[in-house]
Amino acid sequence: MKTSVTRRSLLAGLGGALAGLMTNSLAQTAKAAVKTVFVRTNAPRGYDPSKHKWLMCFDVDRCIGCGLCVEACKTENHVPQGPSYFRTWIERYIIKRPKPGSGSARGEVIVDSPNGGRDGFPPTLVPREDILKSFFVPKLCNLCEHSPCVQVCPVGATFDTPDGAVLVDPHYCIGCGFCIQACPYGCRFLNPETKTAEKCTLCYHRITRGKKPACVEICPTEARIFGDLKNPVENDPIQRFINQNKVNTLKPHLGTEPRVLYANLDKEVR
Amino acid sequence: MHRPIMPPQVFRLVLLTIAIVASYFMARWLLTPATFHAYGFYRGEALAEHMTPEPVYAGRNACGECHEDVVKKLAAKEHRTLGCETCHGVSQPHVENPDVKLTKIGDNHCLRCHEANGARPAFIKQIVVKDHFRGDKCTGCHVPHQPNEMP
């Protein structure tokens, strides 16, 4: 009877196995090297994103336009000081009286945001008797349920986290700026230092440590309300806000389903 | 002479195909970060990287640990909605080392909220500086922690 294992085949098999083992150890080393390139962090452990759902609310009637939130955001997140780099900002709306006999309910709408409102708002040049009404609207990332910015990113650098934030992975971002164009709320900018897209992270390093975002911490009138939908506290400010106000979102017709809620929002706010 | 299973040219093609497919899986295994599918189609470790920076603002709870009396006083009156750092500024260095002093607050800081501005809602008390100002500074007449109390 002829055996199927010859000396030649046995040696070849052994050699192949040895080569396989060596390749495997080489691959493990390479993978470890890749890992050290991508992973460098000393973040606080023990935070489970799937156990939280963060929500931000604004009461437009409470915003006094002091701009301290904009300043605090820049300090907290080391946002460049330039005139167009904001993770949060305040807009002032001035709605003029309609021209007599024009038949419209309201006149021209003037929106300004000098330096994002960081230094407060100077008195407007529009004469007082021409103003129908005027108010401040704080803005930041609208935390869309269906984020256009996430859909357009060609390298998958931006994503929705399970706890409701929309974050940018700066190691993946190539700075193409598609997301900046896609965001209907203008909430993103290209950081001139890192050359990557940046946006409000809900102060991710603060909320994961049990603190409030810097803008909420600083706001003197509680115009910004922040909370966790999955872990409501006693007399929860979010629940109270939604119960007591008629809430709306910005640009609901776009179907982005923002989770940032506004109370007392005027229809002219875009 | 034993007969080959398939013609040699087909055999080479099969080998080549296996090599290409194997190198694809090898590259994918090598280049996909360890935490890639932890939460979704992105690097899970990116969340940890966003958690990494140390907070700059300490938060009002940190202030209450030493200045409980002031926090209580503040909570009783009109300025109860203000955070400590709304006026006193960045406090994390002071929390870590009490010898580090906070920055001085100027009168302009009061005016950021209380200067008359047409867009401001009516609930906030507003002043026209040139009609209102009588002393050398705001704190000459007003106690910031209890605004309606006279010193």
Image (cartoon, coloured by chain):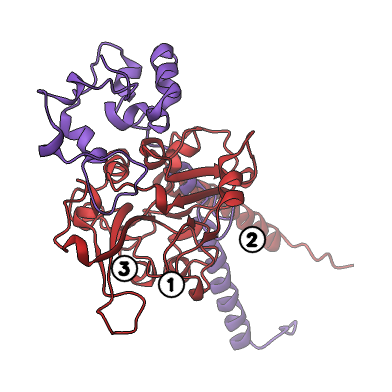
Chain colours: A red, B purple
What is the distance, in whole Å, between disc 1 and disc 2 at their CAs?
Answer: 51 Å
Residue type for callout 1: Val
What is the distance, in whole Å, between disc 1 and disc 3 at their CAs?
Answer: 10 Å
Whether residues under marks 1 and 2 lie with C-beta atoms below 8 angstroms apart, the answer is no
Q: Could you tell which of marks 2 and 3 lies nearer the N-terminus?
A: 2
Chain containing mark 2 = A
The residue to which callout 3 is attached is: A177
The residue to which callout 1 is attached is: A152
Asked if A79 appears above or below B150 in the picture, the reply is below
Residue type for callout 2: Ala
Whether residues under marks 2 and 3 lie with C-beta atoms below 8 angstroms apart, the answer is no
What is the distance, in whole Å, between disc 2 and disc 3 at their CAs?
Answer: 54 Å
Q: Quadrant of residue B73?
A: top left
Q: Which of marks 1 and 2 is in front?
A: 1
Q: In which quarter of the image is the C terminus of chain A?
A: bottom left
Same chain, labels 2 and 3: yes
Same chain, labels 1 and 3: yes
Under circle 1, the secondary element is helix
Under circle 2, the secondary element is helix
Image position of A138 (left or right of A9): left
Q: Could you tell which of marks 1 and 3 lies nearer the N-terminus?
A: 1
Q: Quadrant of residue B134?
A: top left
Q: Give the residue furthest to the right.
A: A1
Under circle 3, the secondary element is loop
Residue B7's spot in the image, x, y percent? 66, 88
Q: How crowded is mark 1: few (under 14 residues within 10 Å), some or many (20 or more)?
A: some
The residue to which callout 2 is attached is: A12
Residue A237's spot in the image, x, y percent? 56, 41
Residue depicted at 42% across the width and 45% down the height? A223
Asked if B135 appears above or below B43 in the picture, the reply is above
Chain containing mark 3 = A
